[in-house]
Each structure stands twice: as C-alpha cells, then as structure tokens.
Image (tube, coloured by chain):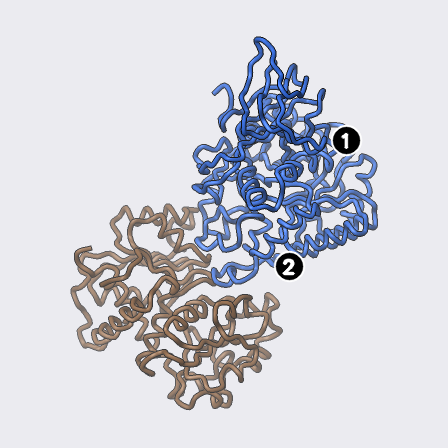
Chain colours: A brown, B blue
Amino acid sequence: MGLVAKDLLTMDQLSVDEIELILSTAKEMKTIIKRDIKKVPTLRGKTVVTLFYEPSTRTRTSFELAGKYMSADVVNISTTTSSVVKGETLKDTGLTLEMMGTDIVIIRHPVSGAPQMLGGYLKGRVINGGDGFHAHPTQALLDMATIKEKLGGFQDLKVAIIGDVLHSRVARSNLSGLMKMGAEVWLCGPPTLIPPGLAELGARVTHNIDEALRGAQVVIMLRIQLERQKAGLFPTLREYSQLYGLNRQRLKLADKDSLVMHPGPMNRGIEISSEVADSLQSVINEQVTNGVAVRMALLYLMLGQKGE
Amino acid sequence: MEFILKGGLVIDPKAGLEKQLDVHIKDGRILALGSDINEKGVEVYDLKNKIVAPGFIDMHVHLREPGGEAHETILTGCQAAAAGGFTAIAAMPNTKPCADNEGVIELIKARAQRAALARVLPIGTISKGQLGQEISEIGSMYKCGIVAISDDGKPVTNSEVMRRALEYTKIFGIPVISHCEDPSLVAEGLMHEGRWSTVLGLKGNPAQAEEIMVARDILLAGLTGGRLHLAHVSTKGSVELLKFAQAQGLAVTAEATPHHLYLTDEEVKNYNTNTKVNPPLRSAEHLEAVRNGLKENLIQCLVTDHAPWSREDKEQEYDKAPNGISGLETAIPICWETLVVSGYLKPAELIAKFTTGPAAVLNLPYGSLEVGSIADITVIDPQLQKQVRVDNFYSKGKNSPVDGRTFQGWPVMTIIDGRVVMQDGRLKGE
C-alpha cells in the first residue's frame, strides 16, 4: 500500500488511512536515524531534487538527509544560483529537471499553488515543501508524528495554534490534518492576523491567548515576522509579545503535561520565552528529528514501492 | 445584398415585439417585417425555433491593440465578437499607448473598419495617461467618435479628478465608466476575501474594496449631476448602493459580466490562473445579488469584460498571472443558461441587457429591429447545447475558465449592416 495521488500537495488530499500509514512508516524510519551507520539501500538509483525558491534550513536539509540515509542521489537547487535568475519559468525549470531523469521534485515556493502547477506539468512526483500561505504538509505530518509519539493519538486532544495564522501554511496544514484525526483545533492571534472563514472549516477561533491555552494538551507557537509589523498588522513586537507570547506563567493554563511545539526558526523572547522553549514540556528538538523520519517515510512510500 | 430570415421568433425589446415573423433585409437595412414574406430569387434562411434579436452590443471589451498585439488585435477581437454573436463592441482605452488622444482613437477606428466584422466603439480615457491626475482631451476625442470615457483597469483614486470628469462630460452627454476599487484596501489581494482565500492561502480582496468606490462615485454623481456607469458590478453591497442611487433619481447605470453571475471563488481552488480576474470571482451570495440586480433592472447591461491574454502570460504562478478572462465567445451561452434557463430573466429581458441597455447608456442608434433601422442582428438557438473549446476560439486569448463545459443557448448567426458574418459559430468566407 502506498499513497493514492502522484503528488503530495496538501493535507486535505490525504485520507485518515494514508496519514496513519505515513506516521507508522516514519516510526520505523526513526530507528534508522538513531543507528550508528545511518544508511539503507532502499532508494538506490533514485534521484531526488530539492527546488527551493525560498530560504530554508530544516526542511531542505531534512529532505536531503532523508534521501541520503536511504541511498538516493540528492541534488539541491537554490534559485539564486540557477537559471531562475535568468528568467526561466517554473514550468521550464521543472521540465528541464525531469528530462535529466529525476524521480521526485521537492519544491518550496513563495506563491501559493506553485507546487500544484509544477505537479500538473511533470510526469514525475512532486512534494510540496511549503507554498506561500497555503500548505506545508510535511511540517504538519512531522508535528503529528511528534504528537502521536508523545501522547499516543489525536482523538479529542485540544490543540492550540497561536500567532500569525493569516500568513501561516503550517497552521493551515495542521488544522486540516489534526481535525481529520479527531483533534479539536483552536486558532489564536490578533484579529489582524486571523483570516476569515476559519470557523466554517471547523476551527475554534479566539483572540484571547488564555482561552486558547486553557486545558490544551498541545500548544503550537507560530513564528512572527518583523515584516508583518511593518505592514501595519500589529504596532510593535514588544506589544505582540506581551499579548501573544508564550511564557512560563501563561503555560500553566494548559494541561500540566502539555507539549510545546514550534516549527522554527524561533524568535526567542518574542513569540516564545527561552524558558519555555528549553523546558521539559518543549518537544521542539524532537520535531526536527521527526522531520527527517517523516520525509524518509514519504520518499519511501512515493519512490520505494515496487511494482508500480 | 438581400435575404429573408424565415420563421424565427423575433424579439425586439425596444418595440415590445415578440412574435414569429419573417424579416426582409436589403441594402443594410430592415426592409420589412411580416408573417409570410416571399420574394422570388431572394435567399432565404430558415430560422424556425430560433430567436431573431437586434444585434448584441458588448460595451466592455479589451482589444489590446495598439501595444498588446501578442494577446489580441483589433482584427482577432472583431472576429471573436462576430463569432460570439456581437455586432458592436466598445473598446476600452487601456492600450499602449492608451487611448487618451485623437491619434489612438483614429487608429482604432481605421483598423476596425478594415476588419469590417463588428462595429468598434472607442472609449477614451478619463485622465491623461490613465494616471488619474488630469482629465484627458475629452472634447477632441468626442469629435472622433468616443462613446464614453473610462480609466478601466485602474480606479480614479483622486475624488476631485472624478468629480471634474463627471462635470466636464455633461457638455457631450457621454457617461463616465468607473472601474470601482479602492486600491489601498485591495492591497495585494489576489482573489475574493473569504473562506476560499483562507484555504488557498491567497491574499484576499474584500468586497468592500469595490463598494467603497461605488459609494463614492454615486455620491459624486449626486454632487455633479453627471452620468455615471459602473463597470463590472460584482458584490451584494454594490447592488444595494445602486438601489440607493436609483431611489435618489441619479443618472447611474451599471453592468455585470457573465463570470460574476456564474463562477464562484471556489473555482480558484486548483489555482487555474484563468480564474484570476478583476473584480475577483465572488462567493455565492454575491452572485445571487448580482443576478437579482439584473432582474430588478438596477443593472441594465451585460458585458464580457473580454480580457485576452497569451498562454505564456497565464502559465505563471497565481500571483504573477495577469487578471482577465477571454469572454466574447462564451458570454451569450453563459448568460442564457444562468439567467434565462434558470428563470431569472425572460428571453426579452436578457436581450435588452445586450441591446437597449447598452444602447441607452452609450447613446447608440442600434438595438432595434424596426423597419428602416440598420440591419444588425443576432440569431440565437435557445435549445442548442455545445461544449466550449478554447482551441476553437477566434480570439488570441484562450484564457477561459469554462473550457470544456457545456452550455445551452448559443448564437448561430451574426448579421452586421445586412451582411451575414457568422453562421453556426464559424465566420463566413473561411
């Protein structure tokens, strides 16, 4: 059994069974990462390309390592040193890579929908490594792998996602995936950073961080970007931090064994205090390891299956 | 040239006529209407079960020439118009250079005359260079034949400039066509703001960005007594504001496009850039409001806002792709199905939106089938079901979000100046 669609673009496209399959496969993959010799031959002879139109440390590196741990050949393309700077379109860049024999392209792009567009042009597979404000399915899957590992499941969990929901592909993908698995998802932020229509999608929305935190088993903090302040969406980082930052005192409102998560990179002292980020409740570093495991699972399920 | 259209249902909203009649056409004019006209040796077209209407007028078209010939030319635009059942089209002035002077207006007229497939009615800009700062030489352009002024594609953000335009055009009696949006509220919005913009992660453009400008322009129409025509009305609030304007007795008219009646913002969900248009596709409640606005005659005209783009321009990421839908060759069937088949308008009411409606706004001598009038005629087969195939478009713009869909109610004949230029969807003389 593998994944139904050619490409992995959003969490919406995945069934409950597919999500369970990815998470259980990721659990097995994690044992490889913990070994001294981290190499299995599963994807020998397969070629993985990362095509990133935005800066990234953890997503790109974890895809690269995921491929390498399974013996795939991995090529990284950064748009600042490729033909993209000469004005090549996404379509032509994708087709060029495909003609060179690549098996899967992992794309990150600042425009929502760009991976869908690329997937439509290519016969080979595409994984969305984050597009605009739209979707970041591999981040949601690694967050879910972490939650499942620590708490055993998702049914009736209260998950609070706090911060800049408007510009967050992480929030959208987690909302979709977690709701599908039976969790109750709360989204919290200032009204200027909460888009319309979330209640229609089944989310609970609040502008009061205390309400979001109260009794939550999982708290996911989102990165706030300074450029949002410049766009006039909140007055200062100082005020944002006072209203929506997670600190030790506030965290007491959540379940005493709650998990604290962050997709990174963190702004310590702004959306999350160092004290909380480094506390025992924080699983932020576990998320990074699970990121490699989940991406290994996806590459395996999308490339390693025989008899396709 | 002389021929007889036989046995069709003649619908002429201007004359209040709806009757099965033969139409005798000679030398570019309607010679006679009668219940059984027979003339020896005169060609006869059998139009049983077809509707014979005055030539359809589309008062909102982008022909792209001069400057944008990769997307459309005056010739291909006129071909698309004739194929789509239109006998007259008004050309928006946002070309390169823009139509803010006599020279460009004369060029458009000359090339349209050469095409000889549709009447092209030029529209001049409101402001020099479409910059929204100083009003254009409206009088000189009026002498060359402009039927309206508009900075379509861009709003006139400066309220005083808009005021002066509404005042100055009173000399000539032509309307100011306003493209209503508040750019500071649109910001970088890419689609209608709502549930789908949230799901898709595309920046939203709220309905209020249109409505703020609609409200402002209606108030300025009140201040000046000028003639205001609102382009592509797409929101519930705009329709309510039109009701307010009408209650005040102001000279305010409006138009709507087929896509704002038929397609919702949900269509954007596959990031098909052919759904990217300005104003954006709205949610169902707005579509319903615009349909009712047409029904209540708050909106008097249907227009295509035909905005052709080359494939490579639309084959880009959603934020980079330009706004616009190629609409001339699908407008009539979309409107027929959305408004007539579904019961919002009677056939005569729909025909009025494409004939007497725009003719009144633009002071045109067309839109009638009375004896002696110019023989511009559109024939519709109200039962014909056909699939849209963009590859068969005459327009260079293949950017249609309804490619592959089937609609009922297609134009089957276009007659201009007493000449048949289109029959069964194909141009004559091919």
- Marks 2, 1 in one chain: yes
Nearer mark to the viewer, of 2 and 1: 2
Left or right of B406, for residue B103: right
Residue matched to label 1: B140
| Three-letter amino acid code of the residue under disc 1 | Ser
Q: Secondary structure at mark 2?
A: helix
Disc 2 and disc 1: Cα gap in Å?
A: 35 Å
Mark 2, other Cα within 10 Å: few <14 / some 14–19 / many ≥20: some
Q: Position of residue B82 (x, y in %)?
A: 56, 28
Is residue B411 placed above or below B240 in the rendered structure?
above
Left or right of A147, for residue A31: left
Is residue A72 placed above or below B384 in the rendered structure?
below
State the residue in front, B329 or B145. B329
Q: Secondary structure at mark 1?
A: helix
Residue at 27% x, 58% y: name it.
Answer: A48
State the residue in front, A124 or A185. A185
State the residue in front, A76 or B247. B247
Residue matched to label 2: B185
Residue at 17% x, 67% y: name it.
Answer: A40
The first of marks 2 and 1 along the sequence is: 1
Q: Quadrant of the N terminus of chain B?
A: top right
Mark 1, other Cα within 10 Å: few <14 / some 14–19 / many ≥20: few
* Disc 2 to disc 1: CB gap under 8 Å: no
| Three-letter amino acid code of the residue under disc 2 | Leu
Residue B327 figure quarter: top right
